[in-house]
Amino acid sequence: MSIKLKVCGLRDTENLYDISKLPIDYLGFIYYAQSKRFVGNDFLRPELKNQKTVGVFVNNSEPEILDQLSKNNLQLIQLHGSESPAFCESLRKSIPVIKAFGVDEAFDFEILNDYIDCSDYFLFDTKTPDYGGSGIKFNHHILNDYKHDKPFFLSGGIDFDDVEEILTMNLTNLHAIDINSKFEISPGLKNINKIEQLTDLMIKYK
């Protein structure tokens, strides 16, 4: 199975249209008010034909998430906070769930066990005091210790050169690479040319 690409932190409509023309699999929209890429509670995304849409939430209530799901016809949700397995399980009745985890050198893969049956994907990001968007990467070789069958997204300060390294690592069950801050002109505004170069690179590995 080829590794897919997710572009996260979108909110500019014209920029979004340009991005949607590229061979990208997932587009992420952040509904976390403290993020520099927060789309706002009244954001209505344009219709997209080629990509799956992901709503990124951090410790929101279930009604808040379901409201945005309804408004924007989201196809997946990414839970990036301290959401419990029971919370994930409840939402998974309505929509596929990506559960995110912050990773550092001391990351304990045992914490994933409780989330195996209540999520569709995991996402591994760099552990920081905030909830993603730090632009800091972690040591991807830590993921050689990942032994589950659950497919995962890989995030956390990934730049162009990192992608080439990741694609040669043969990480078991890596489903998608998730890019954000390193492919931006400013927060929420993506560098189309750089992302186009990245999609060209990834096609070579498919």
Image (cartoon, helix red, strand yellow):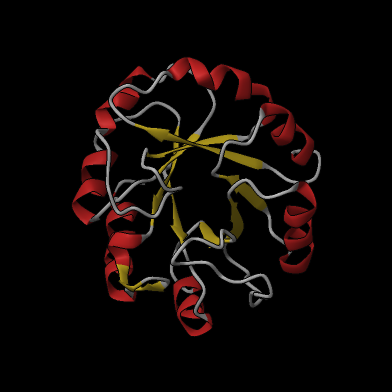
In the picture as drawn, the residue positioned furthest to the bottom comes out as: 14
Seen in the picture, residue 42 relative to 66 is either above or below; the reply is: below
x and y percentages locating residue 27 in the rendered image = 52, 61
Task: State the image quarter where residue 171 is shown.
Answer: top left
Residue 65 on image: x %, y %: 72, 54
Q: Residue 8, position in %: x, y?
A: 46, 59
Closer to the camera in the image, 73 or 164: 73
Q: Where is residue 181 in the image (x, y as percent from the top left)?
A: 33, 61
Instruction: Count the labels in the image.
Output: 0
As drawn, 21 above or below 6: below
Asked where in the image residue 116 lies, by quadrant, the reply is top right
Residue at position x 42%, y 49% from top? 132
Q: In this view, does 153 lie to the left or right of 138?
A: right
Residue in the image at 27% along x and 44% along y: 137
Q: Which residue is drawn at 32% across and 21% down?
A: 106
Horizontal arrangement in the rendering, residue 108 relative to residue 135 (left or right): right
Can you say whether 113 is above or below 38 in the image? above
Q: Is 137 positioned to the left or the right of 176 in the image?
A: left
Q: Residue at 37% of width from left, 23% of height from top?
A: 107
